[in-house]
Amino acid sequence: MNAATASQLAERDARAINARHGDIAPAEIAIGVVIGRTSEFFDFFVYAIASVLVFPALVFPYVDRLTGTFYSFAIFALAFVARPIGSLLFLGIDAALGRGTKLTIALFLLGGSTAAVAFLPGYETIGVWSAILLAVFRIGQGIALGGQWDGLSSLLALNAPENRRGWYAMIPQLGAPLGLIVASGLFAFFVSTLSNSDFLDWGWRYPFFVAFAINVVALFARLRMVSTPEYTALFESRELEPSRVLDTVRTDWRNIVIGAFAPLASFALFHMVTVFPLSWVALFTKESAARFLGIEMIGGAVGLLAVLASGLIADRIGRRYLLGVSAAGIAVFSGFAPQLLDGGGWGEIVFMVTGFILLGLAFGQSSGAVAANFATARRYTGAALTSDVAWLVGAAFAPLVALLLASQFGLLAAGAYLLSGALGTLIALGVNKELARRIS
């Protein structure tokens, strides 16, 4: 059975389950958005944690642990480099075969690539092919991430009540803390209950199997929505159909660039409180990974509350203003964050809690800036491309750069990197007056 046939059968089953009539409420769209983004971020964090705790020892045992982590983070970045390629490829599939077929192929590719990582042999078994296979699987994940854009976030933004746009803009971002909490919890369990040899042999593989299972559930849940006649009509009425990529880039290149830099502060902080501190603790302290993963779970819970708060605050003071204030707060935080991270157990906790509060407020509104920046006819393609460029600029090499700076020049250099992200957001918001007008 080919992918198109499988997609048609899945869509038929989805329509059978979801056969109903009536208006579609924004809250219903929000459910599909949260499911999709949680699946995406869970995959992200499972791979990111393994990049610190597993791959340096499993794939690069022939170099020291720090160098192995650099190599691991370099492969980590490949998904973000491949993501725009996936968007271009799957936008064509969307236009030719439909959103349901595109989504099915993309999520099967994502699940297959993720499951393949779970079976990865180490260097001791197949030599350098271990790294080559890991890179291939990571590129597959990136292409799939670009292809899984379903337009539900844009549809949610367009259907949000006028006075609650900030609240609905934060909903897609709930997936990040939810994915972090579950991924950190799984790895903390296996790290704390298994010996190091058992963990590196088989324990680390189970979170990847869970990621595959979540992808399957997310696929059917999202197909259940996007494949129904009601949603198809709603997408069409809102003109949320693929536009020509070259036309979109030619017309909206400025929006794409500014939209990519507007959330730079939150993306820089995103890695500074998730992937980077775990690598720093694992490499340069004697603290157990399980304990720090527990701290990350606490931070994720705080971040979840902060994302929710961002929606309420943005509806009162405006999304652009909140983005600017939170970027300024991140700039201030960058001045004392290194001292906190290097301040022992309590310093780490204060670092994580403070960082996640700022991250939730900033990251909670970053998707709103992207979605609101395009004319409706180009929003589907424009939002997908902007998201890809934003992750490439703000996230692809962030763990590698932060760890490289910190290892060579100390943690203060990592704070300077965080400051540069905050300044990037403030400059982007200041330069693009049209963006400022639309997301206020």
Image (cartoon, grey):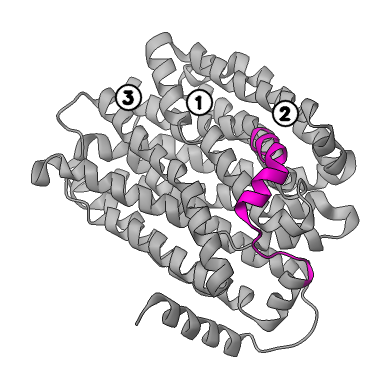
The foreground one among 284 and 72 is 72
Question: What amino acid type should be assigned to the residue bearing mark 3?
Answer: Leu
At x 51%, y 68%, the residue is 102
Q: Earlier in the sequence, mark 3 or mark 2?
A: 3
Q: Which region shows up in magenta?
A: 237-261
| Crowding at mark 2 (Cα within 10 Å: few <14, some 14-19, many 20+) | many
Q: Position of residue 388 (x, y in %)?
A: 56, 45
Q: Quadrant of the N terminus?
A: bottom left
For numbered disc 2, what is the local secondary structure?
A: helix
Nearer to us of marks 3 and 2 is 2
Q: Main secondary structure of the magenta part?
A: helix
Nearer to us of marks 1 and 2 is 2
Q: Earlier in the sequence, mark 1 or mark 3?
A: 3
Is 251 contained in the magenta span?
Answer: yes
- Residue 89 is marked as none
| Crowding at mark 1 (Cα within 10 Å: few <14, some 14-19, many 20+) | many
Decide: is 411 above or below 220.
above
Tag 1 near tag 2, CB within 8 Å: no
Residue topped by disc 2: 428
Q: Earlier in the sequence, mark 1 or mark 2?
A: 1
When asked about the image quadrant of residue 73, the answer is top left
- Residue 348 is marked as 1
Residue topped by disc 3: 283
Q: How many marks?
A: 3
Question: What amino acid type should be assigned to the residue bearing mark 1?
Answer: Glu
For numbered disc 1, what is the local secondary structure?
A: helix
At x 81%, y 60%, the residue is 160
| Crowding at mark 3 (Cα within 10 Å: few <14, some 14-19, many 20+) | some
At x 60%, y 48%, the residue is 385
